Each structure stands twice: as C-alpha cells, then as structure tokens.
Image (cartoon, coloured by chain):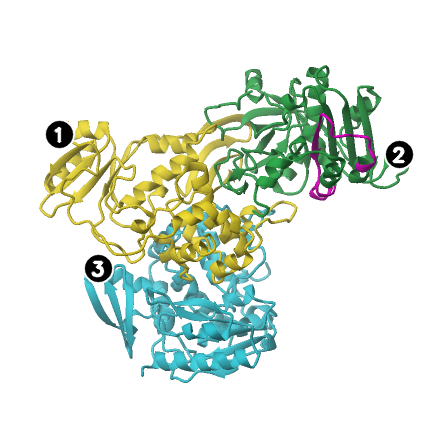
C-alpha cells in the first residue's frame, strides 16, 4: 500500500480523470447502506420467454468507484464476500458487481449518536477491506491506497506516494474520534449464545416491543437474506432477487402451514444468533459493523447494544 | 414542575394502583432510553414502574402491542390518538373492553424526529422543559421550540384527550386551532396533474417494501396481509415503482374509516416517504363522503362496514352500467 | 463425487416433460419424468441418491424436490404434491412442456458407509422419493457390496403408495425383504396393515452391521427413531433427510438454517448423531 498527500483540488481532478474508465460516485449521506451497491434491493437474475427454454442472464460488470463512505460501510464487502463467495457455489451476480467495484472511504472524524464500531473492536479510521481511505488533515488529505490499479492511476495522474507496510504505521491521520466507552461483550455471545437458544425469558425480554417490521434488516450492511421472485409480463418475464428479512413472519412459513419461527421471539433469536454466533462460527467474523442504522431505524427504538449486553449476562 | 414530569408522576401512581389492585398483569407504556427518547416498554411488575415516563418524544402507537399480548390482562398508556385506535380495534371486535385497562394521558403533541434531523443532523435529546426541547448535535447544544418540530399529525390533532379511559393522568392537553394537514391536502389537490403524478412517483420510488409502515400501524393486523397472499398474487414483492404504488395505495385504502391519523406509519418509514399527505387525503375524503371519523365512540360500527341507501356512489361509473 | 460446479447456479437447465403420471388415487401426487432439452446438459445433472433439485417454472417460481429416479437413468424423475402456486403450476405441465432444473443440490446418502453392511430403508407417504432412488441405485450398482436389504414402506391407503409397479417388482425380488403396509384395512389389499413404526418394531431388523435410512412425515420419524434406538441402533447408524422452506438451495439466501448449518447445503441428509448436535429449536 502507498500513502499520498493530496489536496482538495487535486483530489477532485483525479476523480474526474477516472471518469473515463469507470463510474465515480460520491457518497455524501449515511442513510443508505453501501450494501445496496453490492446486493441491490432488486436484481434481475435472468429474463425468460414462455415459448422458448432460452434464458437471458444479466450480470452487471460496469466498473464503479465509490468515494466518501464511512469505514464501517466498507466492511460490508468483507462480510458479504464470506457468504456470497463461499464454495461450492460462488454467487456470480454478487461476484460480477463486487469484482468491478472499488471503494475509497473517508475516515470518520466524529461519532454519530448510534455508532458503536469502536465498541465491537473496529475503528472509524481503518481500511476494513476498502481499496483506500482518505484522512482529512484540514488543508489537505492523506490518501492511503491498498489497490494496485488505483495506485497506478494516481501515479499516472502525477502524484507519487510513499510505500507503507500497513495502516498501523505512524503517519498523520487527522482527527481520529475516540471516546471512553466500554467494549461490548461480544466474546461471550460468540462462545455461548447458542446454548441459550431455549431460554424463553431472555428472548422475551429482548424482543418485548419489537414490531417485526424489518426496517433494521433492510438498512443493515451485514444483512443479506433474499427472496427469489418471478415477475410475469404476459409471455415473457424475469426472475429477480429481492430483499427478504428474517424478521418477517412469512420468511420461514411452509406450504403445510407450519412455521418454525411463528412469533417475534423466535425471529429475534435467529437475528441475534445469526449475527453473533452463527456467522462467527462459519466464517470467523461477527455479522455487525457497528454502524447503528438498526437503532436509528427501529420504530420501537430497540437498541442492539443493549440486547448484546443483556444476552451476555446469560452467556457466562 | 413541568407538565411532562407531572404526567410521569401521575402515570406511575395510577399504574402502581392498577398493578396492586390486580387489574393488570402487564403495562404497555414508555420508558426513557439512554438517548433521551421515550420508547415503548412492557412493564411486568410494580418494581419496574420507576422507569415509566412520558414526554414529547413518545412517538409510537402503543395500541399495536395489544395484539401481541391479547391473552393477558393488559394496561396501556393512551393519549388521544392511541385511545381512538383502541376504540377502533374494539369496534372491530379485536378486544373486549373489560380486558384492557386504559390509563389516559392528555397530550400536548409529539415531535417528529425526521424534522429535527433534517435541520440539525443526528441528535440526542438532552432535556425537556415547558414548551422547549434541548438537543445535542455535532455542533453543540440547541434549544428548540417544541411546536415547530411536532409531527404534522399532532399539528392537526382534533382529539388530544383520550376518548375512553379507566384512569386519567393529571395534565392539560393542547388544542389545535389550525388543521395543518388540511392545508397540506389542499395544496396537493391544487397541483397540476403532472406535478401530482411526479410527486407521487417520487415518493413511491423511495419505497423498499420493508413494511415498517404496516407493522407500526395498530389497524394492520391481518393474519395474512394481501401482499403475502400467493394465490392470487396481487402484486410483486419486488420494490419497483408500480408495485410500490399498489402496495401503498391499497394499504391506505384498507385503512379508510379505520385510521386515526396518529402518524405511526410516517414515523416508522426508514426511507422518509411522505405518507401523511396520502393518509390525510383519504381520511378527509372518508369524512366528506361518509361522515365518518374512526375511533371516537365505542359500539359504533366502522364507517365503511355499513351501508346507507343514500351513500355517495359517483365513483361507480355511468348510470345503467 | 464432488458437487457440480456450474458457472451460474441460479440459472435453470432447460428440460422437457417426457412423461406425466398420477401417483395417487386422489390425484394430489403427480410424477414427472424430465429430459434435458440439450442432451449435453444431462451430465451437469449427474446426482447421487438423496440429492434434490429445484424445479423451476418461469413466471411462477421454484420448488425443491428429492430426486426419485435411479442416477443411471436418462430421465430425471420427481413426484410433486400440489399445495400452492408453484406446485399447482407444475401439476398443469403436460408432456412436451418445458421447465427448468437447478441442481443437483445438497448432500447424498452415504453409499460408501453402506458397503459391507445390511441396508434398512424405512419410509412413509410421499417421502419415499429419494429412497426409491437409493434402492434402485444400490440394486444396480452395489448389489454385491451390500448385505441384506430391508424395505419397510407404508402409506395411508394402498392408493397413496408411490411407484406401485416398482414396488411390485421389489416385493418379488428375493434380494429384498419387503414389508409394504397401509395404515388401515382396505378393500383388495392383502398385505400388511399397521403404522410404519409398529411394523419396524415387529420386524426382525437388527443393528449389527446395519445402516438405516428413514424418511417420512415428521410424526412417522418421531415415532420410528425411538424404535430403532430401542433395537440397539447407534445414532451414527441412522440417517434421515430434513425438509425446510428453501429458496436458493445453495446456502446463500439464509432461509433454511438450523443453527449455523443450512439444510440445503450441509444436508438434507443428516445422521441422527449429527442432528443431535444441531439446536433443537431454530
């Protein structure tokens, strides 16, 4: 990786120059999770026609660079990779999007009221798998690039950078927010939350005011459950992948009428276990970036930080 | 002592009484979160009641939880709109009057978080005085006049006092003199055709079909929502403009004569869709055409469940067809 | 055998309906024999008994079905129960219509473990599909490697038994000890009468050097497994196939998990020992 010093004007010109090769998007708001760019809310898998068995598969290979996201959002790529690229069936749609997507984040200078990335062992000023990170130094930026193609483009643009071992090396990073909050007890959950699967009291307490609305899952950078639906336009149509949610009652409803997760209790249990027990068991990472969108979006203001702390009491 | 503190103390006393007289097994009420918001909480014992509170951020329709706890003796804190939801639900046969203990609250209005966020960015609630809210944002602390940040539903509210109750907390409600949503609806109606369509389409394109609006609404309690019906498949689940429009319009129409205009759907929407102008239009049309307002009196059949021979029928089409 | 790696596991392979037949007297069960429209695709669909396919009807959706045919047969056979939108559309398929198959998906019955042992197949209702595949495959390819073969299969009425012609052939085959039963006495039925768990209990199967595969409705499995355990079967000797609502069938959409495992990818075949390691609730 290489570290470049670049000022605002050069940065804008550099991004302009990249527009010949790829779509460059500046992300300025935090409302929408970056996952929408890698796993769109609706994604056509293929078109079909009723009179022929042929299908037209749609893979998106347009090159795109996203600039300005927060580091927690960049973590989406690492987390979704674990599920979608897993063998033996790597997902070609996700792969096409993600192989043609580059991300340069902007290190956060403040914590939002709902952020808690620092409480789960992450940092608002680290790469998190992004291709680059921009540090605001006031008059100029420090740009750390970890991607050969981007480094080459920036050098061709006329900048020269300093080779860096890793991002923990000491260099100016501008204002890094820090605060004195205790880390959340994630480890006990990873080890023992599964043993509490039958603890009705625990799940009742966590989910007592949940409305099963699903807003949390739609905005979560680490949630990816999807449904596959066909839409017919007369004699032709398409098969699409759309967002689904483990919080919906219909998610596991079976044709016989039986539903393994009939109430909100079972569904919240699945959500917490999936993020903090199953995902780490399968892939080594928790399914949470600490962005806090779920807390902000929840109409009942259920706070996953409190849920974690509460569950940890039962996890030894 | 400001009004909110007064109401809080009154509620705690009344709730304690209800528990001790064994009238309720649990209480659906509010507590204050670490960020200063009143958020829903289920209180299961007298000891927990110290957290029971009320303030101008109490912005969810608690009547929703009555569906969840149907088999218990339930107490519920209810201001005007929530009490009307309860009446509407009882008039639809969802609950017995004697199974629910209602602790009424005279309401002064509730803020709209999104309005505050739009102007100040992310914030937490600091303090609440009479007529003022203190918030903490990135740029520091602000004091704002509450009324400027009340939800549009509260700015149009004709029924801030609970319409039924078993106990009533001490306090004064705020009377609204101007129907804010009336103005919004008239402005929307006055738009030229293309702008109406453009406005509607813009809102519908935002929808991600998360169904938070449906889940937040106490009147949306169908076991199988029309969206989840497979045969016939009324609409696609995919979030495209057309199906989003069908979803939103149909849901709103299904609420005709049942909606109490509490604003829960609008507040719950994570994509900031402007639902209120559509809901308000539907409610005002229902009132104009059928003379009906939901949830005002127990024992009255829901407006669109009845038929009068002289009901307006201009929308059926030409005569003889 | 490794899982088939295809470029795009979401794209169905086009197939044509070669044969349609009613399997049950009440016409709720229909069997479809499917052929690949492009003959070179047939190799992509090479499967082992126990695996399933997602049968795709463009415009309606997909449903998972256990494969009922012998892996060496050209045509792929599934038996479909009409319960909803997609299965209703499948039931409307006629000979010559085309559909799509994604697969084979999931894991398969442990044939390797059956070599040198007795094989007991226990089934009920229309869960018999993958076990029919297993039995045919063992008889064709591994007859000399497997010792005694027992078949215990029951249905509510004689009309609900699957693959009646094959059943007759198996009953006449001296290589298989068959016990076909129906729940209640029925006109014209001269065979066994009784629920499958009872027949299992009364049978002479022993756990010595035996592998048992059990597939049926949840109630049948619930009552049969204890009978096997009573007879002395160890949990590693008993295999079953689980069912959950599925969509992608690839372990990606998140729907069919039990704990950290996916029924579509880590199953649907599990040994009783493995099942006990999974959370009881999910």
Report whether C198 appears left or right of C254: right
Assess disc 1: are there few (<14), some (14-19) or many (≥20) residues with their C-alpha within 10 Å of its C-alpha.
Answer: some
Whether discs 2 and 3 lie on one chain: the answer is no
Report whether A163 appears left or right of B219: left
Report whether C6 appears left or right of A293: right
User: How many numbered marks have been drawn onto this rendered protein structure?
Assistant: 3
Q: Residue B71: horizontal and vertical position, in percent?
A: 61, 67
Q: Residue B302: horizontal and vertical position, in percent?
A: 56, 71
Determine the colour of chain C. Answer: green
Determine the colour of chain B. Answer: cyan
Q: Which residue is mark 3?
A: B138
Q: Give the quarter of the image for residue C267.
A: top right
Q: Element at badge 2?
A: loop
Determine the colour of chain A. Answer: yellow
Label 1 – label 2 distance at C-alpha: 86 Å
**Furthest-left residue in view?**
A139
A250, above or below C141, in the image = below
Closer to us: B111 or A165: A165
- Residue drawn at point x = 39 percent, y = 30 percent: A59
Range of magenta residues: C201-223
- Residue drawn at point x = 59 percent, y = 75 percent: B99
- Residue drawn at point x = 34 percent, y = 53 percent: A292
Q: Give the quarter of the image for residue B154.
A: bottom left
Whether discs 3 and 1 lie on one chain: the answer is no
Q: Which residue is mark 2?
A: C189
Q: Which residue is mark 1?
A: A157
Closer to us: C206 or A154: C206
Q: Considering the image in quadrants, where does the N terminus of chain C appear?
A: top right
């Amino acid at each position: 990786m290489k570290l470049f010093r670049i000022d605002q004007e050069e940065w804008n010109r550099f991004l302009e120059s990249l527009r010949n090769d790829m779509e460059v998007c500046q992300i300025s708001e935090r409302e929408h999770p970056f996952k929408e760019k890698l796993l769109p809310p609706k994604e056509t898998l293929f078109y079909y026609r009723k009179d022929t068995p042929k299908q037209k598969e749609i893979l998106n290979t347009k090159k795109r660079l996203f600039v300005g996201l927060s580091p927690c959002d960049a973590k989406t790529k690492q987390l979704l990779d674990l599920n979608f690229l897993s063998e033996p069936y790597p997902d070609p749609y996700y792969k096409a999007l993600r192989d043609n997507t580059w991300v340069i984040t902007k290190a956060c200078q403040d914590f939002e009221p709902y952020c808690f990335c620092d409480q789960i062992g992450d940092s608002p000023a680290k790469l998190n798998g992004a291709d680059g990170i921009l540090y605001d130094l006031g008059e100029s930026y420090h740009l750390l690039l970890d991607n050969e193609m981007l480094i080459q483009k920036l050098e061709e643009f006329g900048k020269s950078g300093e080779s860096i071992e890793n991002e923990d090396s000491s260099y100016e990073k501008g204002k890094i927010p820090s605060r004195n909050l205790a880390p959340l007890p994630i480890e006990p959950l990873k080890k023992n939350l599964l043993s509490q699967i039958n603890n009705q009291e625990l799940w009742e307490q966590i989910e007592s005011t949940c409305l099963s609305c699903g807003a949390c899952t739609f905005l979560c950078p680490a949630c990816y459950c999807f449904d596959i639906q066909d839409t017919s336009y007369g004699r032709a149509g398409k098969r699409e992948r759309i967002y689904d949610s483990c919080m919906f009652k219909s998610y596991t409803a079976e044709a016989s009428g039986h539903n393994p997760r009939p109430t909100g209790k079972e569904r919240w249990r699945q959500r917490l276990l999936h993020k903090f027990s199953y995902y780490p068991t399968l892939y080594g990472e928790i399914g949470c970036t600490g962005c806090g969108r779920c807390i902000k979006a929840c109409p009942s203001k259920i706070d996953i930080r409190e849920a974690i702390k509460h569950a940890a009491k039962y996890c030894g | 002592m400001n009004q909110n503190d007064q109401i809080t103390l009154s509620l705690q006393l009344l709730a304690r009484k209800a528990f001790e007289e064994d009238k309720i097994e649990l209480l659906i009420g509010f507590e204050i979160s670490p960020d200063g918001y009143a958020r829903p909480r289920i209180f299961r014992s007298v000891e927990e009641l110290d957290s029971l509170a009320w303030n101008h951020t109490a912005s969810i329709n608690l009547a929703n939880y009555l569906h969840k706890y149907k088999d218990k003796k339930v107490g519920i804190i209810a201001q005007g709109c929530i009490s009307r939801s309860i009446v509407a639900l009882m008039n639809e046969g969802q609950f017995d009057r004697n199974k629910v203990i209602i602790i009424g609250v005279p309401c002064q209005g509730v803020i709209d978080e999104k309005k505050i966020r739009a102007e100040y960015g992310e914030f937490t609630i600091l303090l609440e005085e009479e007529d003022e809210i203190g918030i903490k944002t990135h740029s520091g602390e602000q004091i704002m006049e509450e009324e400027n940040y009340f939800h549009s539903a509260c700015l149009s509210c004709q029924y801030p006092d609970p319409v039924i109750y078993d106990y009533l907390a001490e306090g004064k409600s705020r009377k609204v003199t101007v129907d804010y949503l009336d103005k919004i609806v008239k402005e929307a109606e006055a738009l030229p055709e293309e702008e109406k369509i453009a406005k509607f389409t813009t809102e519908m394109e935002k929808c991600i079909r998360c169904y938070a609006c449906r889940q937040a609404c106490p009147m949306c309690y169908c076991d199988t929502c029309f969206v989840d019906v497979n045969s016939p498949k009324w609409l696609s689940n995919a979030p495209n403009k057309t199906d989003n429009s069908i979803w939103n319009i149909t849901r709103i129409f299904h609420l005709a004569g049942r909606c109490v205009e509490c604003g829960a759907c609008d507040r719950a929407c994570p994509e900031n869709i402007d639902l209120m102008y559509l809901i308000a239009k539907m409610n005002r049309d229902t009132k104009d055409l059928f003379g009906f307002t939901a949830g005002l009196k127990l024992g009255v059949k829901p407006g669109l469940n009845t038929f009068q021979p002289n009901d307006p029928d201009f929308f059926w089409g030409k005569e003889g067809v | 055998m490794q899982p088939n790696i295809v470029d795009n596991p979401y794209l169905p392979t086009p197939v044509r309906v070669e044969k349609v037949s009613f399997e049950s007297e009440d016409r709720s069960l229909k069997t479809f024999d499917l052929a690949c429209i492009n003959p070179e695709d047939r190799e992509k669909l090479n499967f082992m008994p126990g695996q399933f396919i997602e049968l795709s009807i463009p415009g309606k959706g997909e449903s998972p079905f256990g494969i009922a045919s012998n892996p060496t047969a050209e045509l792929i056979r599934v038996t479909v129960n009409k319960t909803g939108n997609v299965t209703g559309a499948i039931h409307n398929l006629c000979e010559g219509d085309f559909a799509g198959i994604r697969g084979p998906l999931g894991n398969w019955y442990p044939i390797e473990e059956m070599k040198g042992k007795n094989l007991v197949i226990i089934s009920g209702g229309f869960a018999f599909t993958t076990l029919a595949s297993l039995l045919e495959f063992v008889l064709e390819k591994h007859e000399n490697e497997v010792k005694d073969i027992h078949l215990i299969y029951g249905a509510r009425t004689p009309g609900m038994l699957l693959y009646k012609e094959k059943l007759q052939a198996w009953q006449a085959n001296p290589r298989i000890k068959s016990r076909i039963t129906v729940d209640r006495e029925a006109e014209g039925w001269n065979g066994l009468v009784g629920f499958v768990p009872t027949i299992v209990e009364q049978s002479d199967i022993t756990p010595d050097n035996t592998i048992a595969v059990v597939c049926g409705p949840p109630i049948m499995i619930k009552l049969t497994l204890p009978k096997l355990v009573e007879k002395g079967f160890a949990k590693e000797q008993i295999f079953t196939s689980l069912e959950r609502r599925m969509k992608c069938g690839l372990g990606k959409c998140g729907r069919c998990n039990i704990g950290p495992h996916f029924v579509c990818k880590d199953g649907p075949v599990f040994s009783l020992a493995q099942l006990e390691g999974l959370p009881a609730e999910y």
